Amino acid sequence: MPGILKAPLVVEFPFTRSLGPVQSAFLTGLRERVVLGVRTRDGRTLVPPVEYDPGTAEELRELVEVADTGTVTTWAWNHEPRRGQPLDTPFAWVLVRLDGADTALLHALDAPGPDAVRTGMRVKVRWAPERTGAITDIACFVPYESEPADQPAPHSGEFADPVTQIVAPARLDYTYTPGGAQSRYINALAEHRTVGERCPSCRKVYVPPRGACPTCGVATEERVEVGPAGTVTTYCIVNIKAKNLDIEVPYVYAHIALDGADLALHGRIGGIPYDQVRMGLRVEPVWSEGGRHPDHYRPTGERDADYDTYRELI
């Protein structure tokens, strides 16, 4: 049997969120080199500020300004900085309780080595040269000998041109290993064959195979070749062009129940105007030259399948 497959994959997307009045004031303040916290009913000052008291769930709106100096409460040394981290040289992750605050802020400390870091050391914010209203406006902390600053002062939270939303890029890098069942499925596709696996108990054929029946919970070892033709069970019309996908919109993406399979798989429908695709349409795979999987499915010219033959697969 060919070796188990694996491939590096990246899931990445920008996440845009709106800011309430507290977070808006906090991030706008960082842009202006002002650190704001929020005061609770019992007199504690929370930095970073939150909109609701974590103990009582009471709404919090009383903003105060704290110092940009503070004390390290705990730390861990980062020997190998990763992409996107605050510094590209080894640094310490630190929790810093800023002067005037009762909670600690997590950030990076620029230090020459772990021997230069200790709990209780005094530090100061190093501001980024260009600030946009994000936590990265604090470039990092640096060692700074000073006495604790005064108590926090009330602040209106009002700034010109406030930051009202942020875009947080989300990214996950990982290596995907499909396992034995899906590796056999993918290797068969490279030979223009579609192979599923049959459950020994309920006798359903799963495509793509999962190695076990999700209904019966038993291993599926009997391999069954299905298709190549199938039936459109349901579909959607895509009107938004995907990044890095060279397909003109609109196009149709469908669930296709291959002949002999008891699970519909996904596939793009081509060779027919998008507004003529319909449930029950009989289709067959079209393979690109050298492709390891069908490029799309096209109509076979057969009569549409009767609804009763695929209604359980919708």
Image (cartoon, rainbow, N blue to C red):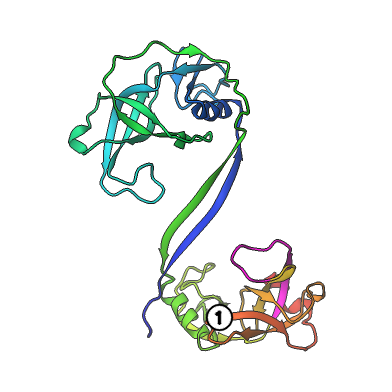
125 or 153: nearer the eye?
Answer: 125
Question: Given the image, on which type of amino acid does mark 1 rest?
Answer: His
Q: Residue at x 17, y 35 (%)?
A: 115
Dot 1: element:
loop
x, y percent for residue 171: 48, 53
Residue in front for this viewpoint, 116 or 174? 116
Q: Is residue 82 above or below residue 141?
A: below
Q: Is residue 311 above or below residue 132?
A: below
Q: Residue at x 46, y 55 (%)?
A: 172
Percent position of residue 23, x then y? 55, 29
Which residue is the extreme one toward the right?
276
Residue 138 placement (x, y as % from top left):
42, 32
The residue segment tinted magenta is 231-247
Outermost residue, front direction? 129
Q: Is residue 234 magenta?
A: yes
Quarter holding the C terminus?
bottom right
Q: Does the rendering let one see residue 42? A: no
Based on the picture, tell me whether residue 164 belongs to the magenta stretch.
Answer: no
The answer to which image quadrant residue 215 occupies is bottom right
Q: Is residue 233 left or right of residue 15?
A: right
Q: Residues within 10 Å of mark 1 (few under 14, many from 20)?
A: some
Q: Is residue 229 among the parts visible in the rendering?
A: yes
Residue 296, quarter of the rendered image: bottom right
Q: Which residue is mark 1?
A: 293
Quadrant that contains the N terminus: bottom left
Q: Is residue 2 left or right of residue 297?
A: left
Can you name the residue that lies furthest to the left here? 115
Q: How many marks?
A: 1
Q: Position of residue 107 (x, y in %)?
A: 37, 35
**Is 190 on the left or on the right of 78, as rendered?**
right
